[in-house]
Amino acid sequence: MRDQAEILRQKMLAADGALARSIAVVSGKGGVGKSNFSTNFAYALIAKKKKVVIVDMDIGMGNIHILLGQTPKYNLMDYLVGKEGIEATINETNEGLHFISGGSGLDQVVEWSDSMFENLIHAFEYLQKNYDFILFDMGAGATEKSIELIMAIDEVIVISTTEPTSITDAYSMMKFIVMKDPETTFYLVSNRVPKKQDGDESVLRLQFAMKKFLQKETKILGYLPEDAAVQKAVIAQRPYFLVYPNAAISKKLSLMTEVFTSVNAEQNEQQASNFIKKLKNIFVRGRE
């Protein structure tokens, strides 16, 4: 596997172009539509001519493949332990979305061998060189190991609903991350919003709390309305952005994606260049 990894590295070094933006999609608790957001956000990016890969990091409960109606043959663990090359773990839908299932055992970071760690770095380097955006669909809530990965990732999109408990949980998670890394860039999204006023108020409350209690600036992406198209799409195992492009939620997501992709390109390039360096430092500390 070490020889294969070296070949992969040479292919990566030969590639030209800007590095991918890495994005963690997180939530303070489950049931807020995080994975559904990740999937449809990815397609909204593709609609803007971006090349996107989703890495499902919701270990043991990952459902990206279910939302896409796919049955992956290999997962990230198959690559890390040397069973397959990284290309074999990358699945592609008919519409051009690429995704990687996590498999099981990814939480055992401190027990990884040197070769597994090297393979992980090679994999992320490969993704950085071959995509415009890498979306990490994280498990709900915050764990020590998931926070370590989030600290290396360029940007974090936080999904909540208008429910008070969801807002509180989202704030608690961001606080936990800020305590570890005050420089983290946060974007706020309120999902499953019954009416516009509720959506506006919920993200503003989160933004205000972060500024007042943590002196941390956050960026509001907006809100996504409650929409019958979502449940229909989930049942059909198809993204609502594709099958219901004229639905209110699809139009809002398209506008939200436009805001996100318009962020300063020079800043993004600097953040992307630090991703692998930060990841190496974090995982080395975890294995000392």
Image (tube, rainbow, N blue to C red):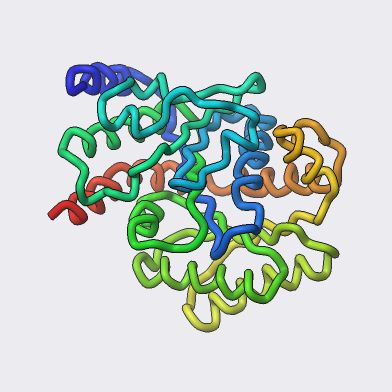
Q: Is residue 68 visible?
A: yes
In this rendering, is residue 12 above or below 150?
above
In percent of width and height, residue 182 lies at 39, 68
In this rendering, is residue 119 above or below 247?
above
Q: Nearer the viewer, residue 29 or 206?
A: 29
> Which image quadrant: the N terminus?
top left
Residue at 51% of width from left, 41% of height from top?
Answer: 135
Residue at 60% of width from left, 46% of height from top?
Answer: 35
In percent of width and height, residue 139 lies at 49, 53
> Which image quadrant: the C terminus?
bottom left
Residue 124 located left or right of residue 22: left
Q: Quadrant of residue 14?
A: top left
Residue at 68% of width from left, 37% of height from top?
Answer: 44
In percent of width and height, residue 187 lies at 58, 58
Q: Is residue 266 visible?
A: no
Q: Quadrant of residue 16?
A: top left
Q: Nearer the viewer, residue 263 or 4?
A: 4
Residue at 74% of width from left, 73% of height from top?
Answer: 201
Among all residues in the image, which is located at the extreme bottom? 213
Q: Nearer the viewer, residue 223 or 34?
A: 34
